Image (tube, coloured by chain):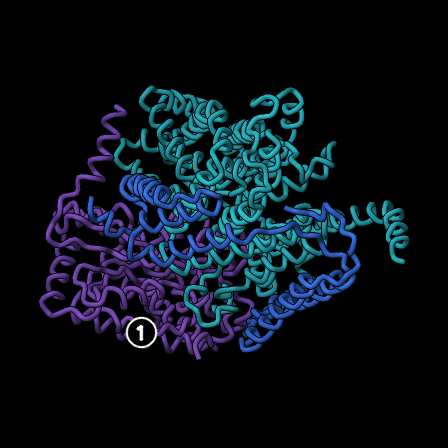
Chain colours: A purple, B cyan, C blue
Amino acid sequence: MKHFFLASILAGALALPAYAADYTIIAPANPGGGWDQTARSLQTVMQQEGISGNVQVQNVPGAGGTIGLAQFASQQKGNPNALLVGGYVMVGAILTNNSPVTLKDVTPIARLTGEYEAIVVPAASEIKSMADLVAALKKDPGAVSWAGGSAGGTDHIAVGLIAKAAGVDPTKINYIAYSGGGEALAAILGSQVTAGISGYGEFESQVKAGTLRLLAVSSAERLPGIDAPTLKESGVDVVVENWRMVAAAPGLTDEQKAAVSADIEKLAKSAGWQEVLKTKGWQDTYLAGDAFNEQLAKDVSATETVLKDIGLVK
Amino acid sequence: MATFDFLLQGLLVAAQPTNLLYALIGVTLGTAVGVLPGIGPALTVALLLPVTYRLDPGGSLIMFAGIYYGGMYGGSTTSILLNTPGESSSIVTALEGNKMARAGRGGPALATAAIGSFVAGLIATLALAFIAPYIVKLALVFGPREYFALMVLAFVTVSSAFGDSTLRGLTSLFVGLTLACIGIDQLTGQARLSFGVPDLLDGIEVTTLAVAMFAIGETLYIAAQGDRGPDKVEAVKGSVWMNAADWARSWKPWLRGTVIGFPIGAMPAGGAEIGTFLSYAAEKRLTKHPEEFGNGAIEGVAGPEAANNASAAGTLVPLLTLGLPTTATAAIMLAGFQQYGLQPGPLLFATNPQLVWGLIASLLIANFMLLVLNLPLIGLWVKLLTIPKPWLYAGILLFATLGTIGANPSVFELGMLLAFGLLGYVMRVFGYPIAPVVVGLILGPLAEQQLRRALSISQGDFTVLFTSPIAAVLLVIAALALIVPLILRARGRGQVLAQLAASED
Amino acid sequence: MNKGNHPSVETRRPDRAALIIAVVLALIAGLIFWDVSRLTGLAGYSQIGPTTVPYAIACCLIGLAIWTAIEGWRGDFAEREHQEFGPVFWIVGGLAAQMLLLNTLGFSIATGILFAMTARGFGRRELWLTIPVGIAFSFFVWLIFAKLLQLSLPSGPLEHLFF
């Protein structure tokens, strides 16, 4: 049994056949996080589906992905076999960190998956609906404390957008930033704060158990299987998606770009990738080509506006 | 009682020969990777998790439990023998443990660490099984102000790692606090002390600082002694095992360490290090051999090591009962659980009892395997010290840099390793203690953030810091811990002052 | 850690090293004041903003600098043992070499050089022996961690030779 086990590791690790397209995927985050998981899932599915024989994942963590982005843009220029995983968080981080390298300096290929924001309150809270929360916010913005992820991140941006849509000065929001989802969730469950905001997945099990009340989600339409109105329905015209994408190196020829796009499309449509989405609970929001570029440009300009409104970007 | 049935069933499954083998492989791999300086339990679990995917759910769960406990334990061996803590939670172990090893008592130090880890792991895992729902309620009561009070208490206890000079201890602490300011301020997103360098935006990695200050600083310092230092450390003086006196002095610290470590591990913003600091301070206050502290007191190894492992089990409390990943390790585990179809959350115990109890049974087995693996190895580990110095320290630097490169292969990170290594060397030359620097880096941001969160939620009302009963009690304990020794010292200072006055002219 | 084990005869002489340390501490404090002063005090609803704690730390550092200077002036500062700098240079050189060569020559060669230079610092002068030993040992370590455990360690010419 032991021999079999060791042999299987050895076989898996050492006997990698050399395929034509060997990819290197840069995950601009530490092992274990969302981008790292995306990169490693890409690695598994690409090898499993025969899209590429040898895929390496490299972690370049730091500063909301901007360090990985900068390194990728300079070192991989013109290399058709390098991929970068990224997402909406990067858009905010580029702005707040004044990063000299932006998403314009790489070749975005496709959006792969995404998650919508959820607004929750503790089950015992007097706030019963999004309308109640908006009313409280209008009455005294400082008295409504929001727990969410890091300052300038997706959660913070969403709160800024909500305040703005509700006609409240975004600089007056009382946003309490936490480092990890767990810490923020503990603060909400312990009723240390008024409301909480994060990706729906963070709250899912609590909402199902009835310890948190889900007020609204930030999608454009109601999400299947989730019993909550959208922000739009609740009279707050805000749509936020925390998406993850894959980008190629800058300076590729059109053929090279098309080849990478074809590989990624094949991946996104494969049974293996759909299986990964299901087990990880990720939404399939695949979007490629011009449609994706358009969406990206819209997201970047909207984010810049709101970060200026909150006062995080000058 | 259904609880016992499930646990027994889980133990029966886990005790099958193949599963025991998986537990052994998991513990071995976990220890092997966890032993590397700079690779803590989080990275160990992240790296080795894919290995478990190839097995059936039962087997992979058991191997995973082995990796987790192995990674948690691995750091203490290098701490004790080589004064190079593998991760932040075994820094305190190095303080007394390495002094013991230098005095030829590395065997007992490793043994008390291994047995203490086992005892703490056993009690804490059982506590996880039976009182988790109550502990988690306590953990949720902790808001920013209670955490702030806890951090104040932790700061007060740091003074026990100051060594003999208050000035140099405080200076070390403030160097650490200054380093802690570097990076993006978490609450406002502004960059502090980063001078436009993007690599500094995420702040100084605790493991980088610890590895540099301890492993590299120590190596440079030993090298600078030239031929004067003892050529070879005498590896074993007396017995390699613990004698009766060692047992008598160890069992109470093990239990106290468990009681301190478990609840702190269960707190969403606690962290394993803080339990080890508090345990060390408690042992230093309670010991009957205060003169040995700083020179190799076995209590100073037994208590913190127990606290370290108890908090590893404590981390699982909010994870299993609430689905709250409170540490990086727990967040990675959450991803692992999803692989087994386990969705941690408040309903987990009700909807998935087999797997939960299977996990708890696996943890018990893994804990036992760790002891089985490590006790016989102690004799071998101690022999490490007999390797000739050139090879030993070349190997230490190889593994110290390997950990950093594996976590983040960037030239900048290695540059920081070198710079902080030199800082650690210079501080050793001038007799500054090293531990407070790392402690400052860990506690500084926690205390600052919790204070600002508390004040932000109260919209600037300072009185909230004292009006919560828990916070008030913690602050009173901190005040007593600070004032009582001062009074005692002032009473005993008469002679010292007289001496000083005499030598003044 | 070395404590003042050998009380020197001339303890009452001002200690220049202590004065330098005091100056360095004061400089760090100045650096904090300078850097933090350009932050916006954007505190939100708490009176303690992103600047408060750094200012407090800087003030304490100045206090510590004065205290250190006084001890240094009175000669109360700790005694140092004699340090040999040759070995230190070898090891620091090894670390610097590894840092600079890592991404071009790969893990095994760069770390092998570090290994040999550290051994040299501890008195093993035979670089012709220690460099090959170091590279072989590093390559073995690379095999285990990069290939078996999937750690991302940079590879160079030597690693490409085999994989």
Q: Image check: B490 left or right of B74? A: right
- In this rendering, the answer to whether A11 lies above or below A118 is above
Q: Which of the two residues, B388 or A169, is positioned nearer the viewer here?
A: B388
Which quadrant does the C terminus of chain B fall into? bottom right
- Residue in view at x 60 percent, y 49 percent: B435
Residue B232 pos. (x, y %): 54, 34
Q: What residue do we see at 19% from left, 65% from top?
A: A109
Q: Can residue B92 be seen in this view?
A: yes
Q: Residue C60: which quarter of the image?
A: bottom right
Q: Can residue B271 be seen in this view?
A: no
Image x and y of residue B133, in percent: 52, 38
Q: Is residue B222 left or right of residue A309?
A: right
Nearer to me, B347 or B483 = B483
Q: Which residue is drawn at 33% across and 59% down?
A: A28
Say which residue label 1 marks: A300
Query: What residue type is disc 1 on?
Result: Val
In this rendering, is residue A194 above or below B208? Answer: below
Q: What is the x, y in percent for residue A262?
A: 11, 60
Nearest the viewer among C101 and B24 is C101
**Residue, far left:** A255
Measuring from the top left, give residue A170's x and y in whole percent: 46, 75
Binning the other alpha carbons within 10 Å of mark 1 as few (below 14), some (14 to 19) or many (20 upward) gives some
Name the chain letter of the residue that bears numbered label 1: A
Towards the viewer: A71 or A221: A71
